[in-house]
């Protein structure tokens, strides 16, 4: 049985040990100039969507981890201030001088790693969603052009059959007959 407790478990979780090879390979397929073949766009749309889903799953764990590290950072800050006060420093000075505490510095480093990992996955997630939308738009554009042209995938010269389409009849055609071609109707 699968549950969120198992999926979002932070036991032995290290954001720097997450395997990113699938994401990196998929991101290399994102077109730099936006030009894609129709068949390629259709295949890549699904690939990009699946990879963004993978990023989204990892983001949920990273959000939990980042929150946990943030709480540990605040705790280590409070302990560092308390330690400075117990050493005889005034409370005001202790609130400004806790930055050299070893535990606080380690907690800060772990929090920064969590934040950096979260930002990396968030950026890849957004890029993959944009690439998915690009592929879907290219696919829709090709299909729209195909429908407008009346092309049904076949041509009599090469063994395909073409269906002839006529533009829809304009009900006001009689009202515009007196206009010249290219004349602007203000």
Image: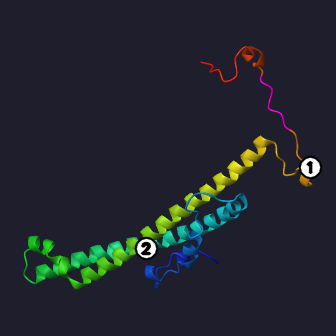
The span from disc 1 to disc 2 (Cα, nearest Å) is 57 Å
Q: Is residue 102 left or right of residue 121?
A: left
Front in this rendered view, residue 20 or 15: 20
For numbered disc 1, what is the local secondary structure?
helix
Q: Is residue 169 left or right of residue 87?
A: right
Horizontal relation, residue 173 to residue 61: left or right: right
Residue range (magenta) = 165-170
Quadrant of the drawing holding the N terminus = bottom right
Q: Is 28 covered by the magenta stretch?
A: no
Local crowd at mark 1 within 10 Å, few (<14), some, or many (≥20)? few
- The mark nearer the N terminus, 1 or 2, is 2
Q: Residue at x 10, y 70 (%)?
A: 92
Q: Residue 134 lies in what quarter of the image?
A: bottom right
**Residue shown at 8%/78% (left/top)?**
89
**Of helix, strand and loop, which one carries label 2?**
helix
**Does the magenta segment cover residue 166?**
yes
In the displayed structure, would residue 155 be above or below residue 93?
above
* Residue 168 in view in this figure: yes
Which residue was labeled with disc 2? Answer: 117
Question: Which numbered disc covers residue 156?
Answer: 1
How many other residues sit within 10 Å of disc 2, few (<14), some (14-19) or many (≥20)? many
- Quarter location, residue 31: bottom right
């Amino acid at each position: 049985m699968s549950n969120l407790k198992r999926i979002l478990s932070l036991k032995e979780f290290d954001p720097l040990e997450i395997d990113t090879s699938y994401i990196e390979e998929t991101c290399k397929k994102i077109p730099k100039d936006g030009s894609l073949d129709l068949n390629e766009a259709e295949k890549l749309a699904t690939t990009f969507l699946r990879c963004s889903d993978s990023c989204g799953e990892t983001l949920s764990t990273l959000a939990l981890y980042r929150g946990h590290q943030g709480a540990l950072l605040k705790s280590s800050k409070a302990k560092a201030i308390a330690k400075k006060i117990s050493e005889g420093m005034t409370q005001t000075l202790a609130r400004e001088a806790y930055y050299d505490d070893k535990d606080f510095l380690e907690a800060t480093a772990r929090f920064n790693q969590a934040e950096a990992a979260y930002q990396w996955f968030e950026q890849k997630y957004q890029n993959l969603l944009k690439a998915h939308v690009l592929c879907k738009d290219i696919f829709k554009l090709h299909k729209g052009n195909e429908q407008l042209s009346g092309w049904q995938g076949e041509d009599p010269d090469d063994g395909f059959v073409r269906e002839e389409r006529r533009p829809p009849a304009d009900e006001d055609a009689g009202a515009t007959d007196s206009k010249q071609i290219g004349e602007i109707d203000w």
